[in-house]
Image (cartoon, coloured by chain):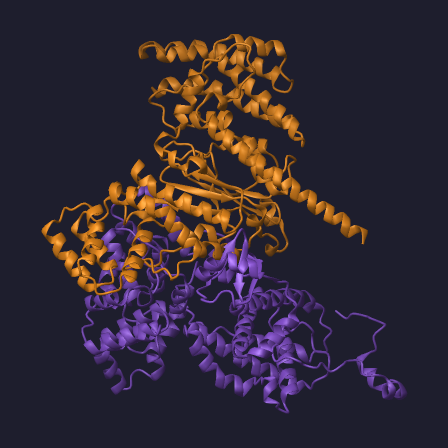
Chain colours: A purple, B orange
Amino acid sequence: MIRHDYSRVDSKRRANLDYKKRQFANAEFQQQNYEHRLNFYVLPPTAEITLEEFETWAINRLKVLSELEGCSFRNRGPEETAEYMKGILDKYLPLRSDSSRSQKLQDERRRDHYSHFILRLAFSSTEDLRRRFSRLETMLFSLRFKNDDLRERQEFVRNLNLEWEEVKDEEKRELKDELHAASGIKKTEEQEWFKVDWERVPELVGQRKVLLRRGVAYVPQREQMSMVVAEFTKRLDEALELTARALPRLDEDDRLAPILAHLSQSFTAPDAAYSTSDANIDGLSTITANNIDTLSQNFPLCMRNLHSTLRENSHLKHYGRLQYTLFLKGIGLGLDECLVFWRRSFKLMTDDKFQKEYKYNIRHVYGDVGGDANRRGRGYTPYSCQKLLTEPLPGPGQSHGCPYRSFTPDNLLSALQRMGINDRDVLKTVKEDVGKQRYHVACNRVFEWSHKREIKKVKDDGSWSATDLDTIVHPNTYFKRSWLLKHLGEGNVGFVGESAMGGEEKMEE
Amino acid sequence: MPHSVTPESTPADEPSTTVTQGDTDTVEPEAEAEAEAEAEAEPKAEAEAEAETQDVAMEEAPTPTASEQPKVNLEELFDDGDSDDEFTSSVPMPASQDQEQGELSQPAPIKVTSKSSFSDPEIMRAFYQRLFPFRPLFQWLNHSPTPSNDFAHREFAFTLPNDAYLRYQSFPTADLLRKQCIQLLPSRFEIGPMYSTNPRDRKTLRKASAFKPVMKELVFDIDMTDYDDIRTCCTGASICLKCWGFITMAIKTIDVALREDFGFKHILWVYSGRRGAHAWVCDKRAREMDDQKRRSIAAYLELLKGGDQSGKKVNARRPLHPHIERSLVILKEHFQTSILAEQDPWASEEKAAHLLNLLPDPTLKAALQKKWDSAPSRPSASKWADIDALAKSGSLSITPRDLLEAKQDIILEYTYPRLDAEVSKKLNHLLKSPFVIHPGTGRVCVPIDTRTVEEFDPLTVPTVTQLLQEIDDWEGEEGEKKLQDWEKTSLKPYVEYFRRFVAALIEEEKQVLKREREEDVDAMEF
């Protein structure tokens, strides 16, 4: 639709304006001066940039954000992430501190500012994109905040004018012990403390890192970051919401729209998505409830653990059921067979109880019941390793999640030994991996060891390409690969790529 | 004697539906009007009851005659009952009639026999008609006497007698909720959040995103199943007074944290009907929290981490956070009594091995192992004392401080509340309403007074059948002010507690509203 706004000059005629006016008019937009390295991105940029700059700056920032997302998927710790991101940031989005006295200081900050706002345009259209963008921008902000020069950071924070009440010396003295106990800080009286409503520092509250008194949180100076970051996220979320609303009215001459669309498309989730091809495995006949025990030989540890817990207790708690049902659905167990499987597994339960309390959930997972969206999407997708690794740890009596993450090293090792992993070196390296929180690396190591002969074979005869043996990031991939490797030479087994093609079609039916 | 109950149920049905319809006819937005309407409904229930007095006598008579006589009664009933009701339903009942009823001995409308089960439709209907405190419940959720969206946009979910689950129900007033309950006779119902629009209209919205939860009490659920690995007295669904001790400890710990740390004031604890307790934090500040804040409160209160395979479940940071420190002080006492003496958690060899696993010192472990091998049946209290005794006698290779901390962790593992945290984390999570009947036990989900939480005994909580019996057995004094049915039963203290709770909440809400209005006025002046 064309909007007629007569007060505005037609863009085509803009160049033909009275030259005198053009020549002597004051610049409409002021170049912003960036005093601080960090930016809350409150004011949008107003000066002109070229189309090329528009695109390259945005793409560079996007690269940084994707890498950051990758770090969180790989479960990298904060230090590891900072280490890894350093090179990438220097290359694509350098941002030097005042003390560097670099010539490019203003230029870098301008780029940072512009690229942020360009991506904001590109990622405000859907709720999903907004949430991801805000999460990643927050990660980037806190990464930079941490690296920032201490003095410059304080200066920046002071400029934000956040409403914090300082704790008076007298109160500090009074609460000395409590403050120490809550924060772990020894010399509490030397620190600066702030009083804020606890709602402003939910993270710190969740980790029990602050003292709470009737809804007021006592935050030490060093935890300031959490509050600043929370404020950053809050403002960004609000702004994104506004951008989304303004987006349809974007005054645009079809040069930017394609770029923006392209940007948001290339922002695809690197999350190891479950592909339907994992469900259909050549040579594996239709799975029934009776096969599960046999097939569990090829399950990854997380699923084996659920399976054996189920066999031991004849019961699994909700999240265990959910995780396992999804996995079984993923390996191609149909709904009817799945119901049979669970009914038989819960052998201490009456039919009535099963029908009433369990059946619906299983059907819901398969998309057999539930809301329109659930049924159309055929239920939920099987969980990936990333999902299992980022969920909260299982509580008492629960056995879901990733055992590499949730078991104590001793229990993990004995579980692995029960699985037949008895090579000392492997167990030792697994323990090291787990110690460094590289859970998926540990799992892949176990896979490689237990399939070492088969892997060697397919590598040697070249029947499997390198991508077929890529790192496993999904329990269903683990199963599929394990099953195929263990059944090499039976029929046309082995060509993962081809079977994948066939699989997708069959799932659609 | 089911066959004698069935014929009578028909006449009982008739008047009851008319009563409720008459009831809703008179509904007006004003709370006072409602109060009247409800007060009016009660005598009618009695009128219907009066017609049936003969039946009750009948029931006590030997069975053979029972099959003949009801037929006669049935017709009489139809005549009386119907005409009686048609005249009274819409017109306020004249005083004389009231008098008449008072003169008759207290009638027994619902035939509660030792054989009737609490899930009988008759029983459920009588419960919703005569006992369930709909008005306080309404005020509780509505936060003001006049019906507002706080109540009208609130989701209710019914579990019907055939176990169908009916979500997204909503009601403008308490009476409509009551009417629906009497019609559908849900075995229980749950309360969800208040939504941005009326839940019943959710499908008519142009954008699905316009329908979203905006407010709900912060809720907690403590269930005995989470304690199964440490409780020795019962398993599964059964409970006794011993294991209720876990819930008592949990209530005390959580309640004090919510009040002192978060500053919440209006916390309603409710017995879940079988083996757990729920908490409803009703402060405005709590109701308006988003998921992230709910998650962080849940995380703040959660201490035990890890599944069955993860070994030591408590690894508290030192120095102990003030909340944990305070909890430890509360729980220590219970540890001596409820755990060591009553639960005796390390009596068996296997359990004792678990205790050893929780200790960090190999030398001490070996010494203890040796000692317990020779006397395997030592009670837990002695085993617990052995730790210190052997440590003192030289079998300690770590510092006494480390041992103390390990012991603190063990105390916490065995006593610290085990929340079903998922319930608390989501704004749109549904939770069973207070005062409904637990379908498995027949007990009413009554509020628990935290001031006397130690005395609360789940096994003495009244069951629905017992309550109805109490109405029947009640001997009213003549000329006294007319009592509502719940006042004649042992439900009375619970309803009164709930009403006081709601009154306090509304009182505070009023002040908040007033303040907001004043601020508004100020803003207008600018």
In screen coordinates, is B15 left or right of B309?
Answer: right
Q: Is residue B449 above or below residue A303?
A: above
What residue is shown at x 45% (from left), y 50% (from top)? B423
The answer to which image quadrant residue A140 occupies is: bottom right
Residue sitting farthest toward the bottom: A103
Q: Is residue A356 above or below residue A282?
A: above
**Which quarter shows the C terminus of chain B?**
bottom right
Front residue of A57/A262: it is: A57
Q: Residue A469: x percent and y percent?
A: 32, 80
Q: Is residue B333 above or below residue B300?
A: above
Q: Residue A85: x percent and y percent?
A: 48, 81
The answer to which image quadrant residue B508 occupies is: top right
What residue is shown at x 59% (from left), y 40% (from top)? B151
Front residue of B222/B374: it is: B374
Residue sitting farthest toward the left: B374
**Which quarter shows the N terminus of chain B?**
top left
In screen coordinates, is A455 left or right of B7?
Answer: left
Q: How many marks?
A: 0
What residue is shown at x 36% (from left), y 37% (from top)? B274
Can the viewer see residue A467?
A: yes
What residue is shown at x 45% (from left), y 38% (from top)? B450
Front residue of B71/A357: it is: A357
The answer to which image quadrant residue B339 occupies is: top left
Front residue of B92/B226: it is: B226
Q: Residue B488: x percent and y percent?
A: 47, 20
Q: Residue A222: x percent and y percent?
A: 51, 69
Can the viewer see residue B418?
A: no
